[in-house]
Image (cartoon, coloured by chain):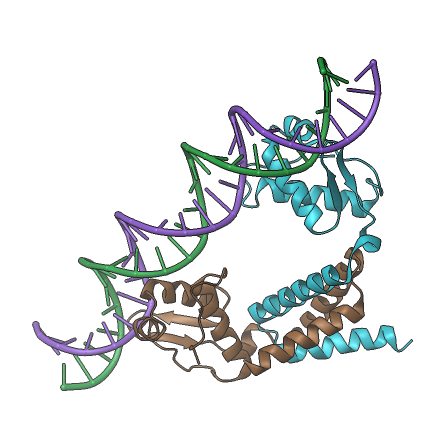
Chain colours: A cyan, B brown, C green, D purple
Amino acid sequence: MFEEIDPRSPTPLYAQIAARVRVAIAAGDLSTGQSLPSVRTLARDLRVNPATVVQAYRDLAADGFVELRHGQGTFVQEVSAFLKDEERATRAQQMVRKLLEDGARLGVGAEELSRAFNAEVGAEISE
Amino acid sequence: MFEEIDPRSPTPLYAQIAARVRVAIAAGDLSTGQSLPSVRTLARDLRVNPATVVQAYRDLAADGFVELRHGQGTFVQEVSAFLKDEERATRAQQMVRKLLEDGARLGVGAEELSRAFNAEVGAEISE
DNA sequence: TTTACTGTATCGGTTAACTGGTACACTAGT
DNA sequence: ACTAGTGTACCAGTTAACCGATACAGTAAA
């Protein structure tokens, strides 16, 4: 499950690890309440420093995917249920900013994105 | 036009400069064939090193927004050749759909995204 | 309490990104 | 040619990200 990790990749090791866990959760390979490998165990398996695994886990915790319990382990969170309003708002802001940023990079302006957004959302909400 | 640039921002100076030019082109403030400020001129205006401006311009050139001509200057490229209107609309739709998809996967609903979107767009226009 | 696990905290070394300084090379007009 | 503008190329200092090593601290069961 955590086999393919590339030290030479431009994306940091901790980001690669965190991404693995995210897709595992999304795919259902990891369900709510289930414990993840300990930082040392996973570090040994991946030939990586424990601190690197910690950084990955903290990233996941910041996004609300997992919870780190001192002395017990790291456990998968109920994603949508445990998210607080503030966190969701913050994440929405981050996602939208990235959207606008990517759009600007490709020459797609805010107006076009706004039209597309309203078209998509309007279709879903009006139903 | 290139006034507001923040050295303390986590986003690099060259990225900020490139972003300014992108939005200027998207907004029509810069039209095809028009010349941009020279690297030294803009560097002096922004209190920045010429190499930083060069990096921004090279980024834009890599994306097809501008063309650097040795000894002559930097000029805005034909935008429509880069992305036609239809393509931009399609692109916008794809990006928005991906946004909604990612949001749903992370537990962020369309309403929250809509609020964040309007907030961001409103903030950018005032800028 | 002891033991064996768990996450936490902090320090260093390495690396790459970022930015500035400076010299080089091309172009157009004089 | 010369000059004054342009972009180009290269090197150095600073900063921050990244990652490893190691010691600290909480938890649970024997």
In the rendered image of this protein, does residue A101 appear above or below residue A5?
A: below
Instruction: Name the quarter where the C terminus of chain B is drawn.
Output: bottom right
- Relative to A105, say whether A15 is above or below: above
Q: In the image, B82: left or right of B4?
A: right
Total number of numbered discs in the rendering: 0
Residue C20 at x, y percent in the picture: 30, 61
- For the question of whether residue A113 can be seen, the reply is no
Q: Is residue C8 above or below residue D28?
A: below
Q: Residue at x 48, y 74 (%)?
A: B20
> Quick one: C3 or B90, which is closer to the camera?
C3
Which residue sits at x=56%, y=78%?
A: B80
Position of residue A28 in the picture relative to residue B82 (left or right): right
Q: Could one spot residue B112 in this view of the protein?
A: yes
Q: Residue at x 57, y 43 (%)?
A: A12
x, y (%) of residue B66? Answer: 45, 72
Residue A33: x and y in percent read 84, 40
Figure check: B89 above or below C6: below
Q: Is residue A51 left or right of residue B31?
A: right
> B62 or A66: which is nearer to us?
A66
- The residue depicted at 31 percent of the width and 69 percent of the height is B70
**Quarter placement of the N terminus of chain B:** bottom left
Q: Nearer the viewer, residue C15 or B9?
A: B9
In the image: residue B52, left or right of residue B11: left
What is the x, y in percent for residue C2? 71, 13
